[in-house]
Structure formats: C-alpha cells, structure tokens
Amino acid sequence: MNRFWSDITREITPYVPGEQPRDKIRIKLNTNENPYPPSPGVIEYIREMANSDLRLYPDPDSKVLCETVAEFYGLFPSQVFPGNGSDEILAFVFQAFFGPNDLIAFPDVTYSFYPVYAGLYRIPYREVPVREDFSIDFSDYPQGLKGIIFANPNAPTGLYMTPEEIEKLLRSRPDTLVVMDEAYVDFGNESAVPLVNKYDNLLLVHTLSKSRSLAGMRVGLAMGHPELIEGLNRIKNCFNSYTMDRLAQAAAIRAFEDDDYYREINRRIITERERFKETLRKMGIPCTDSKSNFVFLTLPGIKGPDALRLLREQGILVRNFARHPRIADWLRITIGTKEDMDRVVEAIIKIMERQVSQ
Ligand SMILES: Cc1ncc(COP(=O)(O)O)c(C=O)c1O
C-alpha cells in the first residue's frame, strides 16, 4: 500500500498469471502453451522483418493482418480487430460495451480474468454457478443482462458447447452481447465464426498464443459485427494506437498462411489429450471431457495444493486454483509432447501409490 495509490489500485484484486520458471529442466504444463514451436515460416518472416523499418511506427490498423484473418474465416476485414494478446482485447471489450449501470454475467468457473476486468472497470457482475458436472446452463442466467462472457471450450474445465447451442443463446437474448472466448477452439472443435455474419450480438475472441504457438508474441483477435469492431477501435485509440508492433503483425499473418503446419501440431496435441484422458480414466482418476489443450483432473484423496507440490517435486509444473473453493482440489495440466505426458503419468502413479501405502 502506498499513499499515492488510487481507490481502484487499492481495492482491486489483480489476476495472477501462471508462473514462468527460469529453470528449463522442469516440464512446464501450467499455462497452456503449445509444446511445438511456431512454423519455420513464422520464424523466418520475423527475422526478415527485423530490419531498419523498425524505426517506423507500425500500421495502427493492422490492415494486412485484418485482411488475412478475414479471408481465412470468410469475413470482411471490418469484422476483425487484432490486439496485443486476447487479454488486452478482453480489457477493451469490458470498457467498450459495459459500464457501471449495466449488469453482466459469467459462469462461476471460467477464465478468472473476467471478474478482474469487471472489478477494474467497476461493472456489476453475477457469477452464475455451473452445474455439478461443470456444464453451463444459460437458462440459469437472469434476464436483462447487458452481456454474457464465457470461454468455449471453457477454462479450466475444457467443456465445449456446439454452435447450435450457442445459436440458441444468441437467438433467445438479442439484446445481450454474448462475448465468447474461443482461445482453445482449434483443438478439434467447430468455431462459431460463421454466426458472426448472422448475429450482431456475438463477439468472438481468439488468441494465437495456444494453437499457433505464439504466446511470446502477444497476438489476439476479436471478430464480430462491424459496429462492435468500431467500438473496440474507439477504445483502443483512446489508449494506444499502436498495440500491434511490426513483428507481431508479420508473425500473425504468416501463422495464418502456414495453417497446414498448425493443423498437424494441434492434431498431435489432440491425440495426446485423448490418450491422457483414457489413461486417467483407467486409473480411476476423475477428469472432465476436455476439448482443449489441457486436461482438468483431481487426484482422489489429495488436496489440490498438495498435488501441485508433489508434481513439482518431480519437476512438473501444473496449475491449481486454490483460491476458488469449487475447484480447489482440481489440477489443470497442459498437454505437452508424448514424452512430457508419459512423465506426467509416471509421476501421478508414484503419487497415488504413495497415497495408498500411507
Ligand atoms: C480462456 C482464455 N482467454 C484468454 C487467454 C489469454 O490469452 P492471450 O495470451 O491471448 O492474452 C487465456 C490464456 O490463458 C485463456 O485461457
């Protein structure tokens, strides 16, 4: 606490990001990064763009990137907004569309940054409990909401809702802005992008941090009705006209051009995810049917923070949400390479055997 802090700085509870250890020998499965590198073309293009033009400001509208993304998804460039990571876009979303006189809602188990933004911008919010099996039921949500925000597949449960289910929500609440965070959609799921052309109350948020191996580059996207995109641009241009640097724009453009490479590495992640879930089921370890690049599980009889520590002692870093009572005993483990996952299974077996013998 410092005497110069504003009321909001004093009162806010900031988001706590996953640890980024310096120690390289750990198997790092705590922040849902892709275990595979960006495509060789992306690295090459970043190198090529690291030239004397860096003295010039980047294109503030990321025009070529918007055109590339629009073509990729069958949209117009006016329906695309890029940002410095999807976290930044989410911050703009909360500011652009919601205010202190609006009520918004999200599931009680979802990406834990949403309540942080709502707190930061003083937007009243309701956290609606997910069902016992962690699924979301929108009929539990109050009427008259200005916005509903959730991740699909949800985080950290990995549960996925189909575009048909989403369309039902959009149709039943035309005056509610549905912000759907598709950070993990590329891991074997169908995106709701086509619905953007049909519903003006849908805003999709994507990231290149997970399925396109660019967490270190910071690139996110929003896709929606041109007026929603204009709203985001109004806020962006009150904050920082150049959120997307030259290298980030170049990397993102090339990442969409190299789609075949990403399909292949993500196919490997999906295969590993299914194999890991099957192994857990055979071992009697409860896990959700995650459709993401992580698995959400609980080790029977072991408290979440203890499980985290026991895995860490074996050099494996995963994520636990000890501050969230409903999921305090659950772990979120990112899917790594086959070798990573074999080591995770070995470590879990060791922990469970020790548990039985105690
Ligand atoms: C659901 C969800 N949305 C957004 C993000 C943020 O991604 P970015 O790296 O694009 O800021 C994450 C990162 O973990 C996430 O899990």
Image (spheres, rainbow, N blue to C red):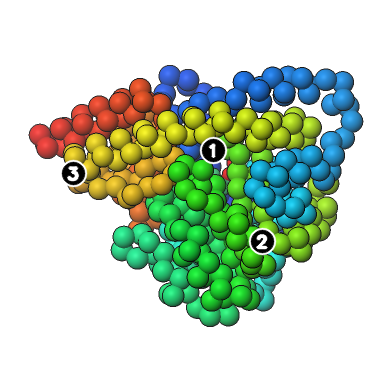
Please say if the residues under marks 3 and 1 sit with CB atoms less than 8 Å apart.
Answer: no
| Amino acid at the residue labelled 2 | Asn
Upstream in sequence: badge 3 or badge 2: 2
Q: Which residue is mark 1?
A: 210
| Amino acid at the residue labelled 1 | Lys
- Mark 1 C-beta closer than 8 Å to ligand 1: yes
Whether 339 is drawn above or below 203: the answer is above
Could you tell me residue 279's position as x and y percent? 24, 36
**Could you tell whether 199 is left or right of 152 in the image?**
right
> For the residue carrying disc 3, how many other residues have a C-alpha within 10 Å: few (<14), some (14-19), or many (20+)?
few
Q: CA distance from mark 3 to mark 2?
A: 44 Å
Q: Secondary structure beneath disc 3?
A: loop
Could you tell me residue 267's position as x and y percent? 44, 34
Residue visible at 61% across and 39% down in the picture: 208
Q: Which residue is mark 2?
A: 197
Upstream in sequence: badge 2 or badge 1: 2
| Amino acid at the residue labelled 3 | Gly
Q: Which residue is mark 3?
A: 284
Residue visible at 48% across and 34% down in the picture: 266
- Quadrant of the drawing holding the C terminus: top left
- Mark 2 C-beta closer than 8 Å to ligand 1: no
Could you tell me residue 274's position as x and y percent? 33, 39
Q: Residue furthest left?
A: 357
**Could you tell whether 282 is left or right of 112 in the image?**
left
Nearest the viewer among 173 and 107 is 173
The quadrant holding residue 65 is top right
Residue visible at 31% across and 63% down in the picture: 132
Upstream in sequence: badge 3 or badge 1: 1
Nearest the viewer among 24 and 257 is 257
